[in-house]
């Protein structure tokens, strides 16, 4: 779900991943990219794509952090049960 949001509305995906300050900067970058897409400039597509890639990386990092936290909790629980 968040990956789909990262492609459609990158700042919202970053905000839902718990990174509000990054969401603000991504919104500025994304908005600038959309404005430049309307104008006949090539950097508009690059700027817009950069905002999307940034959002995908943030969502991926959030999923990785959640997985790592679960693994640590399982290891601690297993260690407590062995004592």
Image (tube, rainbow, N blue to C red):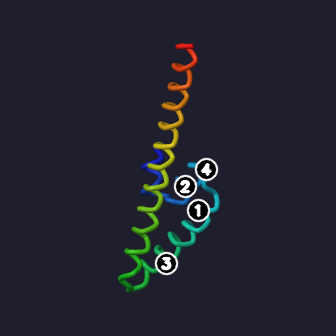
Q: Earlier in the sequence, mark 1 or mark 2?
A: 2
In the displayed structure, does residue 42 sit left or right of residue 62?
left
Q: CA distance from mark 1 to mark 2?
A: 7 Å
Where on the picture, by quarter, is residue 45? bottom left
Position of residue 71 relative to residue 37, above or below, is above
Give the farthest residue toward the front. 83
The span from disc 3 to disc 2 (Cα, nearest Å) is 20 Å
Q: Nearer the viewer, mark 3 or mark 2?
A: 2
Q: Earlier in the sequence, mark 3 or mark 2?
A: 2
Q: Which residue is mark 3?
A: 35
Label 3 SS = helix
Element on which disc 4 rests: loop
The residue identified by callout 4 is 18
- Quick one: label 4, few (<14), some, or many (20+) residues within 10 Å? few
Q: Residues within 10 Å of mark 2 (few under 14, many from 20)?
A: many
- Which residue was labeled with disc 1? 22
Quick one: 65 or 78, which is closer to the camera?
Answer: 78
**Separation of marks 3 and 1 at Cα, in angstroms:** 20 Å
Please tell me which residue lies in front, 10 or 37.
Answer: 10
Q: Which residue is mark 2?
A: 14
Nearer the N terminus, badge 3 or badge 1? 1
């Amino acid at each position: 779900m968040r990956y789909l949001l990262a492609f459609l509305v990158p700042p919202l995906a970053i905000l839902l991943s718990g990174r509000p300050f990054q969401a603000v900067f991504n919104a500025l970058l994304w908005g600038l990219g959309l404005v430049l897409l309307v104008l006949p400039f090539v950097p508009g597509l690059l700027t817009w794509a950069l905002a999307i890639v940034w959002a995908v990386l943030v969502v991926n990092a959030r999923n990785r952090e959640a997985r790592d936290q679960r693994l640590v909790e399982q290891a601690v629980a297993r260690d407590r049960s062995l004592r």
